[in-house]
Image (tube, rainbow, N blue to C red):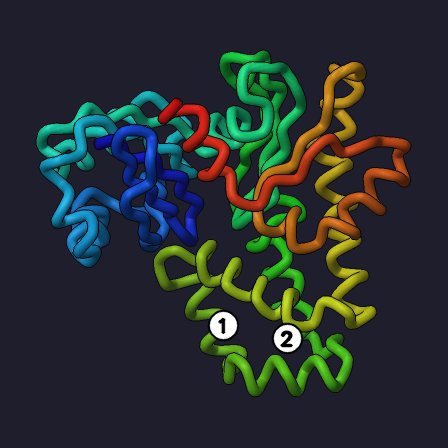
Amino acid sequence: MIAVVYSGSRTAFWKLTQNGQVIAHCNTTGINPYFVDSKTILQILNKKVILINNAERIKKIYFFAAGASSVERKEELAKTLSSFFRYSKVIVENDLFGAAQAACFEKSGIVAMLGSGSNCAYFDGKKPLENNFGLGYILGDEGSANYLGKMLLKSYLNKRLPKELETKFTRAYNLDRAQIFEKVYNKPQANIFLSSFFDFFIQNNKHGYIIRMIDEGFEKHFQTYILPMVEKYPEEDLHFVGTVAAEFEDRLIHTAEKYNLTIKSIIKEPILNLLKHYIN
């Protein structure tokens, strides 16, 4: 049995396969080795009956995780997973590697991630080339769910949301200033708290104020990631991976057209293409 896993900071998608067929699947809380320690990871795994029941049957795991950006993080995560899946060979790569393979398979291209976080890289057909992106939810992640969450909270706290959106936000979350500050500055995994507000964007996706916030986020993403990559690799296809890109595909295409760029593909769930790659 083979397991293929794609994990952002918020959600990890698990597919268990045998003889080329998916026989079980589940979602868990995101497993980002930069933010969660081994004890927490094992607690996450032990909450899923599917994983417990199949732990000893899985012989190989391909795990693509946000935060697995260094050799040390990859080794640490692989060691933790191996302690749960005792008979499995564990292969860990970062989520950008998984996104690139899902979008390009074995071809080259520019691959941008727009999900809980954001990033971009040139994929040479084998691996994403290193760059200076990937600064995380405090210094980077322009256009991502946690970036948009920050913008929404700032608008709410500064009383800049239109009245109807302010009312909806208050009813949906019932958060005051002190609670928001506590969750952002004092509680662990503030990035997940921030990205959780992306649901509000989806629910109000026709509102002009929300559309402007999305457009501003995508504009920042293009200026930070896409334009420098396109300048360096002008002949390469451009691909996007992630929930934010897929949910607001029309606004993403609109932003690309401003720069006379064509988006080759937009993939919401990279786990499906990764399955094709690793079980065939």
Q: Is residue 53 above or below residue 89?
A: below
Disc ID at residue 225: none
Question: In the displayed structure, would residue 100 be above or below residue 241?
Answer: above
Q: Name the element at disc 2.
A: helix
Q: Nearer the viewer, residue 114 or 167?
A: 114
Type of amino acid at the residue the image marks with label 1: Ile
Label 1 environment density (alpha carbons within 10 Å; few <14, some 14–19, many ≥20): some
Q: Position of residue 230 (x, y in %)?
A: 77, 22
Please name the residue that numbered disc 1 is placed on. 180
Please tell me which residue is depicted at 54% across the width and 15% down the height of the picture.
106
Front position in the image: 46 or 146: 46
x then y, percent, for residue 278 = 38, 24
Residue carrying label 2: 157
Say which label, 1 or 2, has the lower sequence index: 2
User: What residue is shown at x 52% (from left), y 32% (from top)?
Assistant: 99
Residue 154: image quadrant is: bottom right
* Percent of width and height locating residue 243: 58, 50
Q: Are marks 1 and 2 in contact (CB under 8 Å)?
A: yes
Q: Is residue 141 above or below residue 274?
A: below
The answer to whether residue 241 shows anywhere in this view is yes
